[in-house]
Image (cartoon, rainbow, N blue to C red):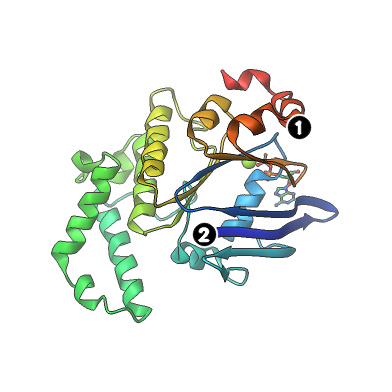
Amino acid sequence: MSLLATKDLTIRFGGHVAVNAVTCAFQPGTLTAIVGPNGAGKTTYFNLISGQLRASSGQVTLDGRDLSGLSASARTRAGLGRAFQLTNLFPRLTVLENIRLAVQATRDGAHRRGLNLWSVWSDHKGLMERADEVLQAVALADKAGELVASLPHGDQRKLEVALLMALESKVFMFDEPTAGMNSAEAPVILNLIRKLKEDRSKTILLVEHKMDVVRELADRIIVLHNGSLVADGEPAEVIASPIVQEAYLGVAPKEAA
Ligand SMILES: Nc1ncnc2c1ncn2[C@@H]1O[C@H](COP(=O)(O)OP(=O)(O)O)[C@@H](O)[C@H]1O
Ligand SMILES: [Mg+2]
């Protein structure tokens, strides 16, 4: 069963159809790479899924539930984690305080939804243990006491991923996660995505230009072109397909380097 799905998802900007009737389902425990030339509609597709933009028509479902009427923050609470879009990092708080707040908000939210988690929520020790576990997972435990504002850019991004873990996101969406990163920071984030994938419980969507990264990480590749889904399948098969060779790799053949 797919966890996340889009059905005929479409958005028009004036006369321009930026995402055109995209129907696609994403399975838990898999990483799907989304590729396509600049302007293909990849970021817009993400915005429609995460709720930053409202679709002109079509649907987004999570666990079979239609998210169409929900705001971006409600979708985050429902389990859609869009990395590096969050303004949720508190720069004047420490790394640990940021994660603790996210863990607490998640447990408090679960309590408000009527689950009997009051005892868990009030269990300070459990909260601290979970926060610590999340920081260990992104290798930031040794920086728990540092102020977020003082962290290097790469560590802030790691913390944003940790925040999604603390929020218990089911879906992790990365839109060109290493863009603007230096050569020391990029592998750290890619490693983190690799680790998330090895966890096998998350559904990961990755927009990425670098074909060597896509080849290594993706279980499946979908190709967007002029807003439409034009290819979908096994990485080797999709990369070899004429549409990708022509429409995508033809645009920037050196980007694989
Ligand atoms: N808010 C917007 N208003 C008008 N046009 C937009 C808007 N957002 C994106 N577009 C257009 O939609 C198309 C797809 O853009 P985008 O999703 O950013 O492509 P990609 O991420 O694949 O490079 C482009 O033609 C872009 O100019
Ligand atoms: Mg984009």
Give the farthest residue toward the bottom: 114
Q: Mark 1 points at which residue?
A: 243
Write down which quadrant ligand 2 falls in: top right
**Mark 1, other Cα within 10 Å: few <14 / some 14–19 / many ≥20:** some
Find residue 243 and report its image quarter.
top right
Secondary structure, mark 1, is: helix
Residue 87, position in %: x, y? 45, 53
> As displayed, is residue 165 above or below residue 207?
below
Q: Is residue 94 visible?
A: no
Q: Is residue 149 visible?
A: yes
**Kind of residue at badge 1:** Ile
Residue 171, position in %: x, y? 47, 54
Residue shown at 63% from the left, 18% from the top:
254
Residue 3's disc is 2
Pick the front one: 86 or 147: 86
Pick the front one: 145 or 110: 110
